[in-house]
Amino acid sequence: MKVILFGASGMVGQGVLRECLLDPHVTQVLSVVRSPTTQEHSKLIELVRKDLFAYDDVESQLAGYDACFFCLGVTSSGMTEQEYSHVTYDLTMAAARTLVRLNPTMTFVYVSGQGTDTSEKGSSMWARVKGKTENALLRLPFKAAYMFRPGVIQPMHGIQSKTSSYRVFYAIGKPLLPALRRLFPQYVTTTELLARAMMHVAQNGYAKRILESRDINEAAGATRSS
């Protein structure tokens, strides 16, 4: 399986990249990044793009892939709905519309969030925008598209969030998170399980198009046992 990954520098993206590079079923990872990183691996190719809203000049490099794991995301704090929609909906759809044209047999996996509002009418601004994005992705003619809605994500293997408030939360909650994940799998997952679940649905499909934390954990378990 050849994979395109967006958001490899974020907490979720770091976990996905790690598991992709470890998984023998993944033969190549094209990581689309704004800035080059120092990471090197025989499977890894970095495509450095300052502009993530247009891909006309690199379409040949985006063709021939089986799956896309879209892990880009920013906090809506301090943004207007128009601003947040631009860096969430517009950015995601610019990539997705290009990829579905170049790779119609691709599986597209989008990381959204627990509480996403697909009615697009709720009181939460970020949830409306994420819901609008999910709805638009599900309408595209990919082979399959899956929306991942994790709740609390426990970072594993030294991975850290880029958001300072999240780092404080994870530092304080670190001793409790493993127990909470066992007790409340419907709310808590890990970066490792999230990544494994993404690879599982990309390779094997899944009964649901929208996966909450419990579904994510179950899909990851299926990968581990296969």
Image (cartoon, rainbow, N blue to C red):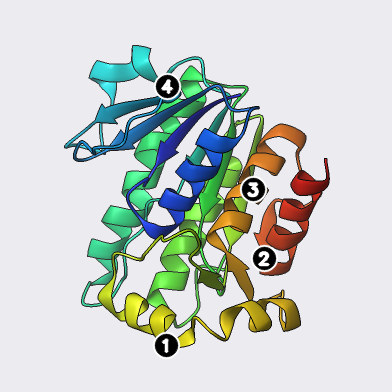
The disc label shown at residue 42, or none: 4
- At label 2, counting other C-alpha atoms closer than 10 Å, the crowd grade (few under 14, some 14-19, many 20 or more) is many
CB within 8 Å, label 2 to label 4 = no
Mark 3 vs mark 1, CA separation in Å: 26 Å
Q: Amino acid at mark 4?
A: Ser
Q: Which SS class for mark 1? A: helix
**Is 57 situated left or right of 10 in this image?**
left
Q: Residue at x 31, y 62 (%)?
A: 74
Residue depth check, mark 4 versus mark 3: number of the one nearer the observer: 4
For the C terminus, which image quadrant?
top right
The disc label shown at residue 196, or none: 3
Question: Label 2 belongs to which residue?
Answer: 212
8 up-or-down from 176: above or below: above
For the N terminus, which image quadrant?
top right
Toward the top, the furthest residue is 60
Mark 2 vs mark 4, CA separation in Å: 33 Å
Q: Residue at x 53, y 54 (%)?
A: 134
Q: Which SS class for mark 4? A: loop
Mark 2 vs mark 3, CA separation in Å: 14 Å
Q: Quadrant of residue 92?
A: top left
**Is 150 situated left or right of 76 in this image?**
right
143 up-or-down from 65: above or below: below
